[in-house]
């Protein structure tokens, strides 16, 4: 069947426009006007050309050439008019996306939010929860779990202020935020309106959330969710509790497969699902929508209902399903696409796959332009596009070597993997060696778990005995999927290293095109043969490079690990955990967000005891992994506690045998032959004492390396640090705040570090490290090493210079 690609270019143009403008919304209105003007001009031009093509009237009188008769001129002009019309539609789609950004951007950044961000003060916020609260990397502070969820900030101000603050309204807001809160007083549900005190931090331009809200204390429920959301919350919680009583990893995976609740999925299983390219099965995806809708339509058709009734029931069930499983990007994309197909079918114009996908994508990007930078949405669209465009040709070609049913089963995951791999490389510069076989084994079990699990969820309030039986039945395929994922990760070479960044994406696209040429390209003709030979050569070169890289990152790189290392930046995700060592003496600056990740790093480096622990400040990504070192710390340098929870951390350290000292400028000591001194904060100062601005900043010197650790200091506090006294040149700097944009170029120019360590998590959602800090480091002659791309980074003295070793080959070490 011929593909209808007419709507694909406008959708791509709208996507590109939205993706560009969400990062610079002030230019959206101007660009929208320019694009709209261009679209109108092109439409008029195309109409004139089309008219002249139909009448045969010439627009000009060029010198007559062969084949330049009236018929050929009419064909050329008509074709040119069609091209201009297509470009005009693309410009109109881009203008529509630009208008959406211009209209929505002001509500995301109201004046009161800018005032609060400038003041750095604690505020009281009213928030409406709109995603399931989940634990932050399984971390507890003071014995209480820390929650992370998305919400809409509707009111903001100091506790003693009313609906106005300095003439600026503080109510009636609609600001999307990501909230971090204590779960001591209970976990809020989707749709609940809560009140919470805390601090607000900015996000980078283009982020889906306009700000981050770090709660202090526990959220207070102001108003519970409306009935239709409460119904869905009750079903989700009941089903998750019932499934949680089952054994094994299948118990945690089943709620994700059936209703999108991933809170029971362990960190190990989540990593295994990602490594084996089965992460799309961890939670409800577009495929689940298709399965549910197909069952509804088949059931209504078997009952003899008319087209209008079938469409109405299908749309109603689809809306209820989205509410139940929560509107994640992939689910909303599938539901929108299904709605377009249903409505077009009801009007007697059956929707085509690619056209429906393009129209659904464009509609969603206009409704929420910030989806243009959402990886989940992009992967959902690309996977669907791969199935629509590539699955058929691949299955037909594979039938030459295998039975047709097996060819169809293999073509589906292969098509999705080929379509998504260029984006997956941006998330992690690796290739899943067993992704296609794992999907071939696991994917057939997903529909069973989805259908049976969803039925069990819906029946739980009315027929609990039947629901329990169905839960056990759905547990079997869920357990099988979990077993496939875990088995895949234990096989040798489960992930193959690959180039990251734009270079990796371009190489992936080239290799994907080569594979497609080899699999589905036509063989007759000399040019086709040459193309196939070139494609085969490219695939062989890429395979050889990958094999060489595997060898290089295995025994070869292990052999060159510097035994005399002095500094090691652990790869612990979005957080800080950096070690400084002299012989048997070890210092640790911050502990990251997760005890398990920190423990793995300490075990890999054979660290059993921490002589000096520095907690720069009390954000979760700096203190969450404390349990990994409790009882193994000699001395702890900490900042002033901000609340009772921070004080409890001091008590836990002291109970484990550590000497706890509040650090301030002038404190100094030794670590073996190394000397250290605290440069920040300044005791007795009324400014920069707590939070990011009060980060304990420490300097080490000796053993051929002078290093500086900046915690999460922002530009203002970095300038204050410079004003407090000269720092001088250093060899290694731990870049502040994971490479955020809030930095002092003058500070980095002064210290002129050779190596900059950026402790940052892959796909962290904040855009860290930002291009601005990378430019600052580059202009200062500082080579940046990032844990998201380089993994563990180790620095050792080497004569009069430094030697840097990185766990992954993307680093320069």
Image (spheres, rainbow, N blue to C red):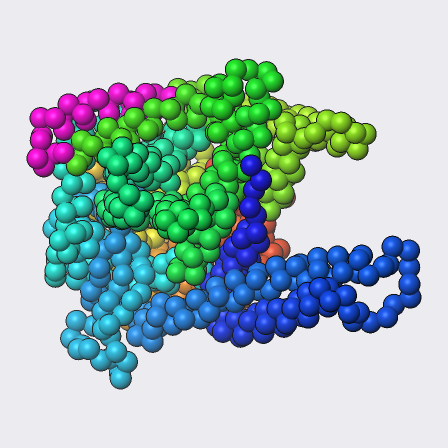
In the picture, measured across the screen, residue 236 lies left or right of residue 119, that is left
Say which residue appears at 26% left-offset and 83% top-offset: 166
In the picture, measured across the screen, residue 788 lies left or right of residue 230, that is right
Say which residue appears at 61% left-offset and 35% top-offset: 512
Say which residue appears at 57% left-offset and 62% top-offset: 89
- Picture quadrant where residue 73 is located: bottom right
Q: Quadrant of the N terminus?
A: top right
As drawn, 469 above or below 737: above
The location of residue 107, given as percent across then percent down, is 34, 70
As drawn, 650 above or below 276: below
Answer whether residue 270 is magenta in the image.
Answer: no
The location of residue 569, given as percent across then percent down, is 45, 41
In the picture, measured across the screen, residue 235 lies left or right of residue 259, that is left
As drawn, 387 above or below 326: above
Q: Is residue 694 visible?
A: no
- Which of the pair 58/262 is nearer the observer? 58
Specify the principal SS of the magenta part: helix
- Picture quadrant where residue 806 is located: top right
Answer whether residue 481 is magenta in the image.
Answer: yes
As drawn, 368 above or below 32: above
The location of residue 145, given as percent across then percent down, is 20, 44
- Which of the pair 556/690 is nearer the observer? 556
Say which residue appears at 34% left-offset and 73% top-offset: 110
Q: Is residue 208 visible?
A: yes
Q: Which residues are magenta?
A: 459-484
The location of residue 299, given as percent across then percent down, is 26, 34
């Amino acid at each position: 069947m011929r593909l209808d690609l007419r709507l694909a270019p406008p959708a791509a143009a709208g996507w590109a426009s939205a993706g560009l403008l969400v990062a610079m919304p002030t230019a959206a209105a101007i660009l929208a006007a320019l694009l709209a003007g261009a679209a109108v001009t092109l439409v008029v031009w195309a109409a004139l050309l089309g008219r002249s093509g139909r009448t045969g009237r010439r627009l000009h009188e060029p010198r007559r050439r062969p084949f330049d008769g009236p018929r050929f001129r009419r064909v050329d002009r008509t074709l040119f008019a069609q091209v201009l019309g297509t470009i005009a539609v693309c410009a109109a789609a881009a203008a529509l996306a630009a208008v959406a950004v211009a209209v929505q951007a002001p509500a995301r950044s109201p004046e009161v939010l800018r005032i609060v961000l400038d003041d750095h003060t604690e505020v009281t916020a009213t928030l409406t929860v709109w995603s399931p609260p989940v634990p932050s990397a399984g971390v507890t502070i003071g014995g209480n779990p820390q929650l992370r969820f998305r919400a809409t900030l509707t009111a903001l101000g100091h506790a003693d202020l009313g609906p106005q603050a300095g003439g600026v309204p503080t109510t009636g807001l609609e600001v999307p935020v990501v909230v971090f809160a204590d779960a001591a007083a209970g976990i809020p549900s989707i749709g609940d309106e809560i009140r919470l005190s805390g601090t607000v931090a900015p996000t980078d331009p283009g982020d889906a959330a306009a700000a981050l809200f770090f709660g202090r204390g526990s959220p207070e429920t102001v108003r519970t969710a409306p009935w239709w959301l409460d119904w869905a919350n009750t079903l989700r919680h009941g089903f998750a509790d019932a499934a949680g009583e089952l054994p094994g990893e299948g118990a945690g995976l089943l709620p994700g497969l059936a209703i999108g609740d991933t809170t029971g999925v362990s960190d190990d299983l989540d990593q295994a699902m990602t490594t084996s390219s089965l992460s799309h099965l961890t939670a409800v995806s577009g495929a689940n929508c298709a399965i549910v809708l197909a069952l509804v339509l088949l059931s209504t058709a078997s009952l003899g209902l008319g087209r209008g009734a079938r469409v109405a029931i299908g749309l109603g069930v689809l809306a209820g399903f989205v509410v139940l499983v929560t509107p994640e990007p992939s689910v909303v994309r599938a539901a929108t696409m299904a709605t377009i197909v249903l409505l077009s079918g009801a009007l007697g114009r059956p929707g085509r796959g690619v056209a429906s996908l393009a129209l659904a994508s464009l509609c969603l990007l206009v409704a929420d332009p910030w989806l243009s930078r959402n990886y989940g949405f992009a992967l959902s669209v690309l996977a669907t596009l791969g199935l629509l465009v590539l699955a058929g040709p691949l299955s037909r070609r594979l039938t030459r070597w295998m039975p047709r049913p097996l060819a169809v089963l293999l073509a589906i995951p292969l098509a999705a993997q080929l379509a998504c791999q260029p984006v997956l490389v941006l998330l992690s510069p690796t290739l899943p060696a067993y992704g296609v076989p794992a999907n071939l084994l696991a994917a057939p079990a997903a529909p069973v778990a989805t259908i049976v699990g969803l039925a069990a969820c819906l029946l739980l309030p009315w027929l609990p005995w039947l629901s329990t039986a169905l839960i056990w039945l759905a547990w079997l395929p869920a357990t099988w999927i979990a077993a496939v994922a875990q088995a895949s990760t234990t096989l040798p070479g489960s992930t193959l290293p690959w180039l990251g960044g734009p270079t990796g994406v371009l190489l992936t696209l080239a290799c994907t095109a080569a594979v497609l040429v080899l699999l589905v390209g036509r063989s007759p003709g000399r040019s086709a043969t040459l193309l196939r030979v070139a494609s085969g050569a490219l695939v062989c070169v890429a395979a050889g490079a990958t094999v060489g890289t595997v060898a290089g990152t295995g025994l070869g790189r292990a052999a060159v690990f510097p035994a005399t290392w002095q500094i090691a930046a652990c790869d612990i995700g979005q957080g800080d955990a950096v070690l400084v060592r002299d012989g048997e003496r070890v210092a640790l600056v911050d502990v990251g967000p997760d005890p398990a990740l920190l423990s793995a790093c300490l075990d890999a480096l054979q660290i059993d005891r921490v002589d000096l622990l520095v907690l720069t400040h009390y954000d979760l990504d700096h203190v969450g992994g404390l349990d990994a070192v409790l009882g193994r710390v000699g001395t702890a340098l900490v900042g002033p506690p901000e609340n009772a929870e921070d004080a409890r951390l001091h008590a836990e350290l002291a109970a484990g045998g550590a000497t706890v000292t509040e650090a301030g400028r002038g404190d100094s000591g030794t670590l073996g032959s190394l000397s250290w001194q605290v440069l920040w904060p300044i005791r007795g100062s009324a400014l920069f004492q707590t939070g990011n601005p009060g980060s304990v900043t420490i300097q080490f010197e000796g053993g051929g390396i002078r290093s500086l650790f900046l915690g999460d200091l922002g530009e203002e506090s970095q300038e204050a640090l410079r004003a407090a006294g000269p720092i001088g040149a250093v060899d290694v700097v731990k870049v502040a705040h994971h490479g955020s944009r809030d930095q002092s170029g003058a500070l980095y120019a002064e210290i002129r570090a050779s190596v900059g360590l950026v402790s940052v998590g892959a796909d962290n959602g904040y855009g860290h490290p930002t291009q601005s800090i990378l430019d600052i480091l580059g202009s200062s002659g500082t080579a940046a090493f990032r844990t998201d791309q380089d993994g563990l980074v180790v620095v050792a003295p080497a004569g009069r210079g430094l030697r840097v070793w990185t766990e992954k080959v993307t680093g320069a070490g």
